[in-house]
Image: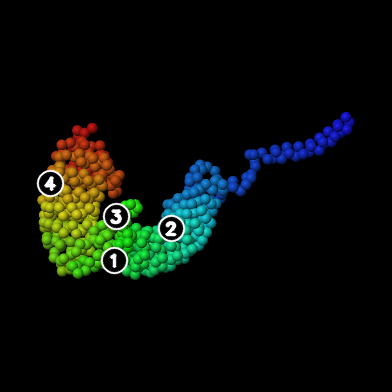
Amino acid sequence: MKIFIDCFISRIKFTLPILAFALVFTACGDDDDMGPVGGGDEPIEFNDDILEQAVAQALDIESGPISKSEIMGLIELNISGLVVEDLTGLQYAENLTRFVAQNTPIQSFDPVSELSSLREFDIRNTAIPEGNLDFLEGLTGLEYIDFRGTGLSDISNLALMSSLREIYLRDNNIVDFSPLSDLTQLTYLNIHTNPATDLSPLANLTALETLIMRNIQAGNEGLDVVRNFTKLRRINARNTGITDLTVLGELMAQGALQDNPTEGILADVDIRDNEFGEVTPDNDPYAPIRPYWENIDSRSPENLPDDFQGGSTFPDGAFESAVRNALGIGPEDDITNEMLLGLEELDARDLPIESIEGIEMMPNLTFLRLDRTNVSDLSPLAALSQLEYFNINTTTGITDISPLENNTGLGTLIARNVPFGNEGMSTIANFTQLHRLNMRNTGVTDLSVLANLMSQGALQNENAPGNTAILDIRQIEADDFCVIFPYIDNIADLDGGDFSDCN
């Protein structure tokens, strides 16, 4: 027994110091006082408070610092329009795949230079410091970049970015596109408005489905580069100095730049503002594309010039004078179809015009004034669909305005003293974009069409320029003005109407 007791006491003596040490360690290690166990919970130091707030909002963090483990959950970040200058702290967002920072004053992109998970990088209208793209070297997984309006002139860093599929380089100072020559995986390229004229480096980009080259003065040689782009669905070659459409015609013959409903493809082609020459009986510069033009969903111009056989387009001399004035040409100069296609505004007011025959050759008109003329027949306007402003004030010979019905984007209609009556209101019913209407003394008695338009937002302040809708219904003997009463408080400039009996 003595031996057992001695052994027990000996063990207690050995154990007690250990227990005491353990208790002290536990007391010192209270959870409330312990620091971070691992680096993942360390708070991130942001140098820019606005950036930190944007990241916190994206992560749905209401208060407290953002930890390194929390920022790992950041997948997308959009700081467009925010006054963010310093991106420090974003280097820990290792899972960020989409970064958008349009119109921001960022001073350096170095903090995001190693975010290899990034796939979309959009800094449109954000100046790239010193035009330096070295920060891209670690972003090898990028598939989409938008560098529009960033002041770029040197894009050599793009040469090795083999994952890119879409590139936006519009509105920059680029003169050399050779760094793009091996990016054969590209499907979308926008180089709109750059000083470069040589597009030959793009010749191997045969996977392109969209090419925006507007305002690139590359001429016919530049257009020849797309000869093998048989997958093209969209091309904007507006104002590029081209005169020969043969290449586009050959592509269209192979199925490129053509609608294909089965595949869900809607083609888009813009060739405006190029000098193709006049269509004559002996020469049709549009011949290569003419058989395919109608099979393009979005085409500019909408209609190609017809074969023009000479003779006057305008039987009414006063109207022809107005057209010549709008075109800025003299009485002896030829009026070409191309000139008429480019005409968007025509002011023929206060002239002794009786016929507007020939206006159908101007399908791109958006602004037209025929006020105080002798016109009585508007049927030539049936060919127009782009009018936004139309004025026939006191052109009293007009009684039928139905030829206007295709101009559904009409915003302003001035038809004072034009006796179109209730029949004309069925045409006005199509103009759901109206924000200004003068129908004073027009013989209308039924205002239900106006009420319906207003219920759709027409002639209401919130949909009008400057939040000012304008309506003149003076000298109207309406059966019931009250049908539009619910909407009149939302018309900033209202003349006429008797609402005394309306609740």
Instruction: Name the residue rendered at 35%, 53% in the picture.
Output: 263
What is the distance, in whole Å, between disc 3 and disc 1 at their CAs?
A: 19 Å
Closest to the camera, between mark 4 and mark 1, is: 1
Q: Label 3 amino acid?
A: Asp
Question: Disc number at residue 419?
Answer: 4
Instruction: Name the residue rendered at 35%, 66% in the picture.
Output: 227
What is the distance, in whole Å, between disc 1 and disc 2 at their CAs?
A: 28 Å
Q: Label 2 amino acid?
A: Arg
Query: Earlier along the polypeptide chain: callout 4 or callout 2?
Result: 2
Quadrant in the picture for the N terminus: top right
Viewer can see residue 266: no
Query: Earlier along the polypeptide chain: callout 4 or callout 3?
Result: 3
- Specify whether 457 is left or right of 35: left
Q: Which residue is mark 2?
A: 165
Question: Is 81 rendered above or below residue 243?
Answer: above
State the SS at label 4: loop
State the SS at label 1: loop
Q: Where on the picture, by quarter, is residue 326? A: bottom left
Question: Disc number at residue 245?
Answer: 1
Q: Label 1 amino acid?
A: Leu
Q: Label 4 amino acid?
A: Pro
